[in-house]
Amino acid sequence: MTERELEFNKYFVKIAENLDISDTMRDKAIKSYQAVGNWLGDCDVDSDVKIMPQGSFNLGTVIKPITDKDEYDIDLVCLLKNMRRADGATIKNSVGDRLKENERYKKMLDKEGKRCWTLNYDEFHMDILPCVPNSTFYSEPRFTEIKLTHKISEMHYTPKYSNPYKYHEWFEQQMQVRAYEIKKEFAAKNQVEIEKVPLYNIKTPLQRTVQLLKRHRDITYSTLSDEAKKYAPISMIITTLAAHAYNNESSVYEALNNILNNMENYIEIKNNEYWVENPAMTKENFAEKWNSETKYRDEFMKWLQRAKQEILVAPKEVFGVHNVSNKMQICFGENIVRKSFSDMGIETKSARESNSLYATGLTGGLTTNPTNQSKKVGGHTFFGK
């Protein structure tokens, strides 16, 4: 990487860090879903209930909402191990009815959704997906396919299938080199076994890239009408294509460049239909809507080209921290970018004062990460008011 690319990598990492869910919020969410799990698991003596996170929370790719009016979305699987033979309505309502028995949860509960029950907390909402094992039993890591219910109309449900455990496993395999390195460092620092470090406690360049791409998507569609927003690229397509394209790059800058330039190569065409295959369930097509309404596919390609221009090209066409910041605000939002650049300014000042600041050439700027070409910057020798 060139000196300037190292500088851009620092910008992207800091923005992604500030997009991430805070430790406090993560702990609050974990305690909340564990409490829900305990309540649902105590519904009767024969119950065998497993609560587990899925989606971005489980993959470590959660991002902050654009405004304080929006909320974090926490997705949970509620696996009813002993209800495999129950009909859709029974599966769905057993969870809803149990939540209504708790006075606190009853006040937080939304109306029944197509697939989930939703609990509304102060700063996030929790989507709880009732499901049962699709096989004779559920046993990790081999028998992990689940059957959920999709409500068509009153008392009419159709079965759907998923495998969040296998998807999580596949996603981690796509970045196994970097994930292992970071988990090893985390385990040593916190004195825990590597195998016990959850994916959401680490951040690889792939995870950071997915966060940045989802944020760019959110910013792109934030000012559009509700009708236009419905065509925005879904997170599962962005995440899956990014994971396919990722080549275990060691920096976020390199990962962004590789992924944005190659992710569309993993869109398949089968029997004249567009496919973004669920790697955990080969019969599921995340891009199914692309074939029933072409605007979904057209909008994805339009967003992808815009992301390449605004994230990879435009910021490198200008010089000076202020101008680069302005370009990145277009990509990721004014407040989050201003905070990120302010944080880096504070870090630079601290590094200067501790004599650990380096210059990286005429256009590279200042950095706290020394390279072969960088030179240490001396402290100020002047005094002012």
Image: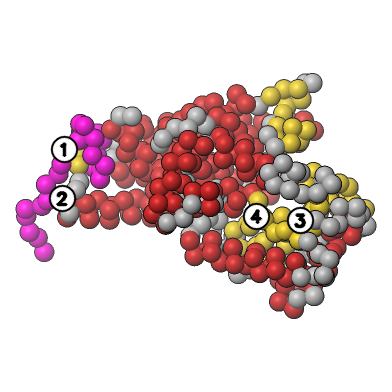
Give the quarter of the image for residue 377.
top left
Q: Residue 225: in sight, yes or no?
A: no
- Measure the alpha-carbon separation of dots 2 and 4: 44 Å
How packed mark 3 is, by other alpha carbons closer than 10 Å (few <14, some 14-19, many 20 or more), is: many
Q: Which residues are magenta?
A: 360-385
Q: Which quadrant does the N terminus fall into?
A: top left
Give the quarter of the image for residue 123.
bottom right
Q: Which residue is mark 4?
A: 53
* In-front residue for pair 326/197: 197
- Measure the alpha-carbon separation of dots 3 and 2: 55 Å
Q: Position of residue 277 (x, y in %)?
A: 70, 32
How packed mark 4 is, by other alpha carbons closer than 10 Å (few <14, some 14-19, many 20 or more), is: many
How packed mark 1 is, by other alpha carbons closer than 10 Å (few <14, some 14-19, many 20 or more), is: some
SS for callout 1:
strand
Amino acid type for the residue under numbered disc 3: Leu
- Measure the alpha-carbon separation of dots 3 and 1: 57 Å
Disc on the earlier residue, 4 or 3: 4
Q: Position of residue 31 (x, y in %)?
A: 59, 67
Q: Position of residue 73 (x, y in %)?
A: 63, 57
Amino acid type for the residue under numbered disc 1: Lys
* In-front residue for pair 139/227: 139
On residue 355, the disc is 2
On residue 79, the disc is 3
Q: Residue 82: in sight, yes or no?
A: yes
How many marks overall?
4
